[in-house]
Image (cartoon, rainbow, N blue to C red):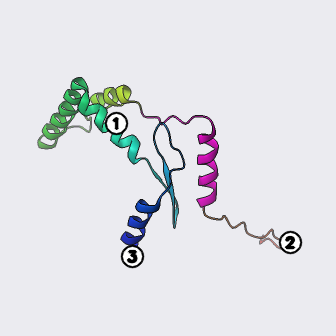
Amino acid sequence: MNRIRLYLHRIFRRPVVTGPYRLYVRRTPAGAMLDVEHYLIAMIETIVDNAELMDLLIEIEDDRRTARHHAHDGWEPEQLLVEKLTAALGYEIPLYGDAVKALADRLRAVAPAVVIPAQRREGGAAA
């Protein structure tokens, strides 16, 4: 049943933010899910189209593969390479103009209702 709901969501969804990357929001039982598919696709295409970034990604993969075969002290040698890659790609999604308000309104609309317990009467609190 959950899969059917997810498929229907993907078919009939409307973006909350349309540019520069489309962002979608859907309600979940515990809160909300932010769908950044278009941003992720753009970042993957950026890596593939840029030979330096692709080499960096391959180097990260090589370091991770060799680290698995050797016992190490917890230091992850590829971490610096990951930092270089994220610095080159960026890790923030820009929102312009009314997109900020639209995203905030949509997140507020799908947020689960917070139940505030009734205030205790004077002297009613356990000592």
Q: Nearer the viewer, residue 72 or 7?
A: 7
Please give the name of the residue rendered at 64% of the width and 44% of the height, measured from the top-left corner.
101
Q: Callout 1: 10 Å neighbours few (<14), some, many (20+)?
A: some
Q: Please name the predominant secondary structure of the magenta segment in the image.
A: helix
Q: Secondary structure at mark 3?
A: loop
| Quarter residue 84 falls in | top left
Q: Looking at the image, which residue sits at the far right?
A: 122
The residue mark sitting in front, 2 or 3, is 3
Magenta residues (range): 91-111
Q: Nearer the viewer, residue 117 or 43?
A: 43
The residue carrying mark 2 is 121
Does residue 21 lie above or below 46 as drawn? below
The residue carrying mark 3 is 1
Q: Is residue 36 left or right of residue 27?
A: left
Tell me, yes or no, if residue 78 can be seen here.
no
Q: Whole-Å distance between the Cαs marked 1 and 3?
A: 32 Å
| Amino acid at circle 3 | Met
The numbered mark, 2 or 1, whose residue comes first in the sequence reads 1
Disc sitting over residue 43 in the figure = 1
Q: Whole-Å distance between the Cαs marked 2 and 1?
A: 56 Å
| Amino acid at circle 2 | Arg
